[in-house]
Image (spheres, rainbow, N blue to C red):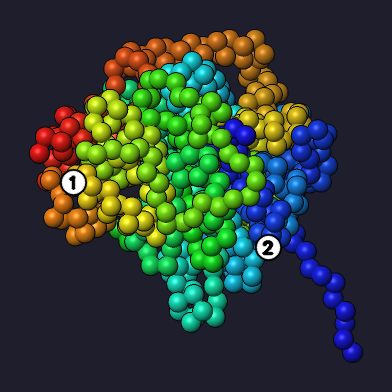
Amino acid sequence: MHKAFHPLSLHVPEPGCRPGDEPDFSEFVIPRAGEARKPAHDATAQSMRDMAFSIVRVLNKEGEAVGPWAGDLAIDQLKAGLRHMMVLRAFDARMLMAQRQGKTSFYMQSLGEEAVSCAFRMALKDGDMNFPTYRQGGLLIAGGYPMEMMMNQIYSNAADPIKGRQMPIMYSAKDHGFFSISGNLGTQYIQAVGWAMASAIAGDTKIATAWIGDGSTSTSDFHAALVFASTYHAPVVLNVVNNQWAISTFQGMARGEAATFAARGHGFGIPSLRVDGNDYLAVHAVAKWAADRARSGLGPTLIEHVTYRAGGHSTSDDPSSYRAKGESSAWPLGDPIERLKTHLITLGEWSTERHTQAETEVMDEVRAAQKAAEANGTLTSGKSPSSRDIFEEVYAEMPPHLIKQRQEAGY
Amino acid sequence: MRMTMIEAIRNAHDLAMGADDKIVVFGEDVGFFGGVFRCTAGLQEKYGKNRCFDAPISELGIVGAAIGMASYGLKPVVEIQFADYVYPAYDQIVSEAARLRHRSGGDFTCPLVIRMPAGGGIFGGQTHSQSPEALFTHVAGLKTVIPSNPRDAKGLLLAAIEDPDPVIFLEPKRLYNGPFDGHHDQPIVPWKKHELGEVNEEYYTTPLGKAEIVRVGMDVTILTYGTMVHVAQTAASEAGIDAEIIDLRTLVPLDTDTIEASVKKTGRCVIVHEATKTCGFGAELSALVQSSCFFHLEAPVTRVTGWDTPYPHAQEWDYFPGPARVAQNLKKVMEV
């Protein structure tokens, strides 16, 4: 007997809401803070399979740190973490304004995702290498890289360490564990695995971290990274920053609607878990756990940071044409700065007055850096990198045809 | 009616999709949002999600899936968000799309259009400014098209869609809104106020493989395409040189008849493109002119191109072969 088949149709995932709709996160399941267990460092992927479908959270609604992942940060470290996130936010605000004023061509902010990069950096050691995307400036700020240098790059000015060659925020800072950012998505992910393999080959103790957004997990580079990391037990932490949106494309397009980004690790036998990316304490604890695993020779860990891109993709983007109004404020995991601030207040170590004062201090600090950077020029005025620099460092040694072209150009 | 190049491309998609339900359009941010440059805006709403949809961020996936669809019998028209992002798809384009007809003895074919914005002039740095046309013209089995105005963009895109083979369609993004002539410190005339922005609303095709003489002249032939068509015209008039300017429009197949006739008439040839020089498409043109017009040449064939370096961010206008550099080379060629 033949079964009759209906004509097929193509399934194209759609986000829950679009402009004009009420933001709705009711289907987004949020486990209670403190609920997630903390596996031993040598736990197998299989034994912690459920953690790729749950979310490690430490800070509860009252601002208390609860559960087995709490308690690894001292008060001073928490205050430093709050400061880093505040600096990053103020930095973003100033640079967005500078872009609007025509001082540079382009900018991308980390608004709403500050905890991910700032907290993660504090779980790393000097000498470790990050292979970041364009939304991990917090790795530099929390790592003590001078803001003025970041701004010099953003302005493509005479003191830009990469000599005006790259678009704004495509930093490179080897001494601060920050690999040169590429404008091509996903390429860095497998490179991080290679760097980690090199550390193992050399008998070193350093680890690498790979960073990628939800959208770019679709790239082949992501999958190649998982294969290599799993095959060679590379000392690498594989981070997926799921901020819900890849320009106008919601995360369901990269994920499909059946699994989580963390669960991508299961097919490769990589221990995988999700963390509340807006919870500084949770991000730090999970980062520390994964970094310790890597450093102990236990291989890769895949971490999905669940967060929200509160701003536009870039200064070239206007999310109001594809995202529901108010979606950002409806995001159920809150704001990372507010949550850490509340925690410190709950502990009796902070106050709203102290916070307001800190905001002023931070803004003054950022303004001072900006003033210093602008003394080196901006994209459109003042000192700029030399046009000779176009021809330098294409090769270690300039070949004859480039010498000739440089002469032709008159530099 | 007057259209920008973006509107002309959108209009071509619309007419093609309306005329042929085998045409499907997809790419990153192409569906609901209508593309980061808005070239596919409104198509999903009009033709549904079965025919215009968003793709995951995987150029390899986009092109590979399009090849599969083409082999089924559909006609995919896909967008690569920036030409600089196409490299993950290169294997699928070179090893698969380009050769499928040949290697299967015509059993499988690959009617497919891969659109991508190319070229610089928008402070896009090295990952949003490249002109990779020579990477495609070097591959047997591909056709490569680069329009320089809205009228041609529409006609050439519709011809590319009708074509039974894979076509690489490079859109000079600096021309999306107007005929940029290289004077970056001056405002451009928008296409809406330019005669080449006048686009017939009906369905029409502009044949592939046919160049257009955009300026008739006697002294020197300028072979160019895309953004540089406008730069070359400005350079010629600023240098006061009676140049004949040929907009190639299609690089493969190439309109060799028009090129040869012009160079034999003028006796001089300057090739202008934005892409890097070494092994750029200018090298092919130069070889062609040298072998077919040798006895008519009064000066060496000269190329004016981007430098053989990555495209810089801050020093963009020192890299870009603007009207001054083109004019200087025209004068040099005239002095021989």
Residue B230 percent across, percent down from the top left? 38, 34
Task: Say which element carries label 2.
Answer: loop
A405 or A154: nearer the viewer? A405
Q: Amino acid at mark 1?
A: Gly
Using a 10 Å C-alpha cutoff, classify the residue at mark 1 as few (fewer than 14 neighbours), some (14 to 19) or many (20 or more).
many
Whether residue A218 is visible to the viewer of this picture, yes or no, is no
> Which residue is tagged 2?
B22
B34 or A209: nearer the viewer? B34
User: Which residue is outermost to the right?
Assistant: A1
Q: Which badge, 1 or 2, comes first in the chain's sequence? A: 2
The quadrant of the rendering that contains the N terminus of chain B is top right
Query: Which quadrant of the structure image shows residue B3?
Result: top right
Disc number placed over residue B267 in the picture, else none: 1
User: Which residue is outermost to the bottom?
Assistant: A1
Q: Is residue A76 left or right of residue A13?
A: left
The quadrant of the rendering that contains the C terminus of chain B is top left
Residue A399 percent across, percent down from the top left? 14, 47
In the rendered image, the vertical position of residue B102 relative to residue B69, given as above or below: below
Using a 10 Å C-alpha cutoff, classify the residue at mark 2 as few (fewer than 14 neighbours), some (14 to 19) or many (20 or more).
some
A348 or A368: nearer the viewer? A368
Q: Is residue A353 left or right of residue B186?
A: right
Compute the Cα span from label 1 to label 2. 48 Å
Residue A193 percent across, percent down from the top left? 43, 56
In the rendered image, the vertical position of residue A119 relative to residue A370, given as above or below: below
In the rendered image, the vertical position of residue B164 relative to residue A34, given as above or below: below
User: Which residue is outermost to the left?
Assistant: B336
Between disc 1 and disc 2, the foreground one is 1
